[in-house]
Image (cartoon, helix red, strand yellow):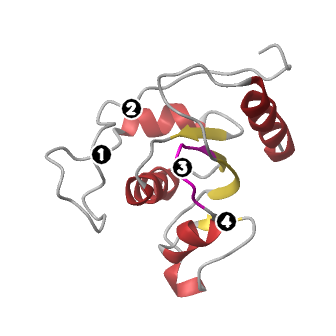
Amino acid sequence: REEGIDTSVIVITAGSGVPSDAVDVSTSSLFGLEPIEVARIQQFKVALIHLGNVRNHIIYKARLILRNVDLPAVICCQAPVDFEDFARIGCKTRLVMPRDEDVATKGTIMEIVTGVVRGTTVSQVKLDEIVAKVKRTMP
């Protein structure tokens, strides 16, 4: 907010686990979105999606969100991921696009910030990176 960006936080009800169509569905819980959550996210100009530290969970959760939400997105996570990881499973990205017949998302990943650990204080360097990438993504 200090940087002139109006924000809101939405905690997804079924936020743990992985989507049912993920490669590794060995966890006991499934990640999903309620229609009201999709509607709330869609109200904004940019989705800042904060995910965790397991590469497959990150990419499949992002795909599920962006399959339902038509917004530019900035992905924040702890694990090192890149645009190719997302494009490989059908996510549209700014730098790498899946083949037309493989596109599985409405929304597009515009930026990625890695090294952000959930539940800990974020360093000023990472905050500056997030702010810069969100501002660059704003329409």
Q: Which residue is mark 2?
A: 12
The quadrant of the picture occupied by the N terminus is: top right
Q: Which residue is mark 3?
A: 69
The question of residue 77 being in magenta is answered with yes
Q: Amino acid at mark 2?
A: Ile
Residue 48's disc is: none
Query: Which badge, 2 or 1, is on the more N-terminal residue?
Result: 2
Query: How many residues crowd around disc 3 within 10 Å: few (fewer than 14), some, or many (20 or more)?
Result: many
Magenta range is 75-81
Residue 31's disc is: 1
Query: Which badge, 3 or 4, is on the more N-terminal residue?
Result: 3
The question of residue 97 being in magenta is answered with no
Label 1 secondary element = loop
Query: How many residues crowd around disc 2 within 10 Å: few (fewer than 14), some, or many (20 or more)?
Result: few
Nearest to viewer (mark 3 / mark 4): 4
Q: Which residue is mark 4?
A: 93
The quadrant of the picture occupied by the C terminus is: top right
For marks 1 and 3, give the CA distance: 15 Å
Query: Which badge, 3 or 2, is on the more N-terminal residue?
Result: 2
* Circle 4/circle 2 CB separation < 8 Å: no
Please tell me which residue is depicted at 64% across the width and 66% down the height of the picture.
83
Nearest to viewer (mark 3 / mark 2): 2
Please tell me which residue is depicted at 52% across the width and 86% down the height of the picture.
101
The answer to whether residue 89 is left or right of residue 7 is left
Query: Which badge, 4 or 2, is on the more N-terminal residue?
Result: 2
Examine the image and state in which quarter residue 134 appears: top right
Q: Amino acid at mark 3?
A: Val
For marks 3 and 2, give the CA distance: 14 Å
* Circle 2/circle 1 CB separation < 8 Å: yes
Label 4 secondary element = strand
